[in-house]
Image (tube, helix red, strand yellow):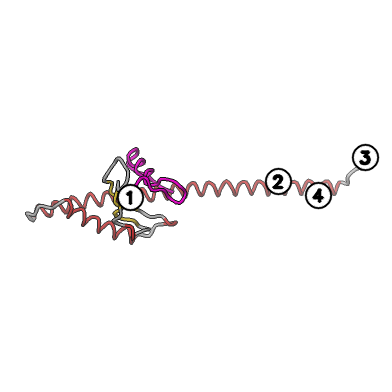
């Protein structure tokens, strides 16, 4: 058996160590990228939840303020008058807001909690304003064959909220 020169042995060890180090760096990069995406998703979810929660507080405050102002003026406000005013304000806000990474907010008014055709009316949609005022159906499938409105309705009924990614 022929002995490998010491210089070649060191070169082989050096190459193996470089390959090992490069593999470790690649794995570290993959892990950090995964962690960044996970943290970004959690941040986006929190940001959207905070935005929605703020909208709810704003809507409740507007309804209360409009009702009190109407009563103080000796006028009986109707539910529809208040709803229309609040919806127009919220529609403007949703359309004017700039969300990150293509995110958007929509508001559907559920009129039938059992689902089915015309179970809800799309009041406001930050990405599809031309569809505002249309009826929605829990039996409508998306391009992937999913039932997004059914999933949305079930999520709202179970958790009071739903976040789509």
| SS category of the residue bearing label 2 | helix
Q: Is 153 inside the magenta-drawn segment?
A: yes
**Alpha-carbon span between mark 4 and mark 1:** 69 Å
**Alpha-carbon span between mark 3 and mark 4:** 20 Å
Q: Are marks 2 and 3 in contact (CB under 8 Å)?
A: no
For marks 2 and 3, the one nearer the N-term is: 3
Q: Quadrant of the N terminus?
A: top right
**Within 10 angstroms of label 4, few (less than 14), some, or many (20 or more) residues?**
few
Identify the residue at horizontal 33%, vertical 57% (top origin).
131
Depth-wise, is mark 4 or mark 1 nearer the camera? Answer: 1
Q: Which residue is mark 2?
A: 20
Based on the displayed image, in which of its 4 quarters is residue 66 positioned? bottom left
Q: Which residue is mark 1?
A: 136
For marks 1 and 2, the one nearer the N-term is: 2
Identify the residue at horizontal 13%, vertical 54% (top origin).
69
Checking the image for residue 11, the label placed there is 4
Instruction: Identify the magenta region.
Output: 137-165
Residue 149 percent location from the top left of the image = 37, 46
């Amino acid at each position: 058996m022929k002995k490998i020169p010491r210089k070649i042995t060191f070169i082989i060890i050096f190459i193996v160590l470089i390959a090992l180090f490069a593999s470790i760096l690649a794995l570290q990069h993959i892990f950090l990228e995964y962690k960044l995406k996970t943290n970004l998703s959690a941040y986006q979810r929190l940001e959207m939840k905070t935005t929605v929660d703020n909208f709810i507080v704003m809507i409740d405050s507007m309804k209360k303020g409009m009702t009190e102002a109407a009563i103080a003026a000796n006028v009986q406000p109707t539910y529809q008058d208040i709803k229309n005013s609040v919806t127009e304000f919220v529609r403007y806000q949703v359309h004017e807001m700039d969300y990150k990474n293509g995110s958007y907010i929509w508001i559907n008014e559920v009129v039938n909690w059992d689902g089915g055709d015309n179970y809800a009316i799309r009041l406001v949609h930050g990405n599809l304003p031309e569809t505002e005022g249309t009826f929605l159906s829990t039996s409508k499938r998306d391009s992937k064959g999913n039932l997004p409105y059914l999933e949305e309705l079930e999520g709202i009924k179970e958790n009071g909220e739903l976040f789509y990614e």
